[in-house]
Image: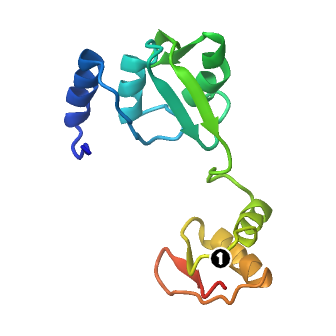
Amino acid sequence: MNTVDSHAAPIAVVNHLTQSARPAIVIAGNGMCSGGRIVNYLKAMLHDPRHDVLFVGYQAQGRPGYAIQQYGPRGGYVDLDGERFDIRAKVTSIGGYSAHADQQGLVEFVTGLRQWPGEIRLVHGEQSKTILGKALGKAGSSQRMAKNDSMQAARGLA
């Protein structure tokens, strides 16, 4: 397995993958495909039907990721950095992993697990994480707040 740790390396990797036609799994961040390394991979590989773009989670309307999901399966195109790119790669989406679930959805996700995790870290939004922690506590967890500038943990979920 190779990992790309610098900002210069992705272009070399993109070039290698497109020239060698070797199979590869590329995991690249930026959930909406609107910036960062993922754009380089998409520009180089979307046109090739040998590739598969896998979305794990929500794509907001008006963003490139959404356009790829909507129009890719129909042989459409997407605009990336002001250029049009035909979508010939297979486009697949997996639901259930979105970071954009509402409070009820998150509580249902945790309580629906066969075995609850030993620890849940709530790291987004000071007020939101407190409210979600309380909701998880109400749902049957014993909750402990870890005093940290940006974190609280719901622990001992059994």
Inspect this view and state whether residue 4 appears: yes
- Viewer-proximal residue, 129 or 118? 118
Inspect this view and state whether residue 59 appears: no
Q: Quickly name the residue at label 1.
A: 116
Disc 1 residue type? Trp
On the image, the x and y values in percent for residue 75 come to 60, 10
The residue sitting at 52% across, 86% down in the picture is 146
- Viewer-proximal residue, 59 or 112? 112
On the image, the x and y values in percent for residue 93 come to 62, 35
On the image, the x and y values in percent for residue 73 come to 64, 18
On the image, the x and y values in percent for residue 50 come to 44, 18
Q: Is residue 4 above or below residue 80?
A: below
133 lies left or right of 123: right
Which quadrant, please, contains the N terminus?
top left
Q: Quadrant of residue 17?
A: top left
Q: How is the image coloured?
A: rainbow
Which quadrant, please, contains the C terminus?
bottom right
Q: Is residue 64 above or below residue 107?
A: above
Instruction: Name the element at disc 1.
Output: loop
Q: Quadrant of residue 81?
A: top left
The residue sitting at 35% across, 32% down in the picture is 24
